[in-house]
Amino acid sequence: TTRRQRLTEVGEVFHQHVSEAMKQLAEASRSVSEIQGEPRGRLRITAPADWNETMGRLVAEFSARQPHIQVEIDLTQRRVDLVAEGFDLALRAGRLEDSSLIARAVGEGATHLYASPVYLERRGTPRSVAELAEHAFVLFRGRHGEARLALDGPSGVREEITVSGVISALDFGFVRHALLHGAGIGVLPDSIGATELDEGGLRLVLPSHCVGRSPFHVVYPSARFLSPKVRVFVDFCVEWVGAELRRSAEVVQRHESPRT
């Protein structure tokens, strides 16, 4: 009419299809603009709680390169749901469980037994896997004061043993501090323990035996277009963490000869 217009049934159908197409076009335009633009904005990252020192150094170096990105870090031992909790990405060690995430491998880290010189001088240095049962352990995820260890020897033979201790924790950072104060022998990722080798705070115990190896990944939600802030951090993280893992492995190799 002269006062009002209304779409016909055919017009309604046409409008629905065109509206969806326009939304996709706008999203594509926005995504391309972001990809071509300068990385900036807020970046929310989660990582294991015992990576506090490592993440401190990583983020400091990243921020020096990318001053327009505001980085928020959540260090926790729980497995964070990135999409539900609004995180851009996560750094994770070990086997990945969520196949809906995009994952980029940054390297693989080994785990060894460590103890302080003070403890080893007081209790002696184990010379075999069997002798570990005679020593006090700072347990990682121990149950009822015990933990089961599987160690791969230099010839590839795996030996298993149950060890015990009065201290147990869910955090490798705590284990490291307890070891530094002579509380016993403990399992540490080389990415955490290697620095103490060069500084003399810790020594390798049965250095030719590896407790395990763990892959490291940076993961982020699946998306058709990756924002510049996420893309630039992922690239930096792969390079930086990979270099740290290689450095840790080199340090451990220098200290692998048994001490008397």
Image (cartoon, helix red, strand yellow):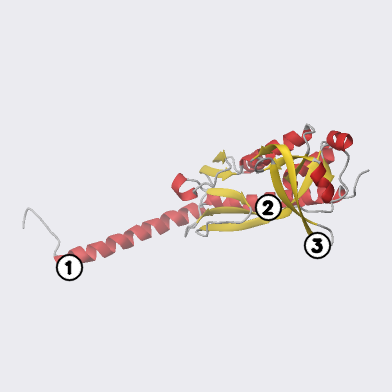
* Label 2: element kind: helix
Return the disc, 2 or 3, that comes first in the chain's sequence. Answer: 3
Select label 1 or label 3 by which is in front: 3
Q: Are marks 1 and 3 in contact (CB under 8 Å)?
A: no
Return the disc, 2 or 1, that comes first in the chain's sequence. Answer: 1
Select label 2 or label 1 by which is in front: 2
Say which amino acid is labelled 1. Val
Density class for disc 3 (Cα within 10 Å; few <14, some 14-19, many ≥20) is few
Would residue 53 be seen by someone viewing this image from the given angle? no
**Residue 237 percent across, percent down from the top left:** 64, 50
Q: Which residue is mark 2?
A: 239
Total labels drawn: 3
* Label 1: element kind: helix
User: At 49% from the left edge and 49% from the top edge, which residue is drawn?
Assistant: 82
Q: CA distance from mark 1 to mark 3?
A: 73 Å
Q: Which residue is mark 3?
A: 156
Q: Is residue 198 left or right of residue 85?
A: right
Q: Which residue is mark 1?
A: 10
Would residue 22 be seen by someone viewing this image from the given angle? yes
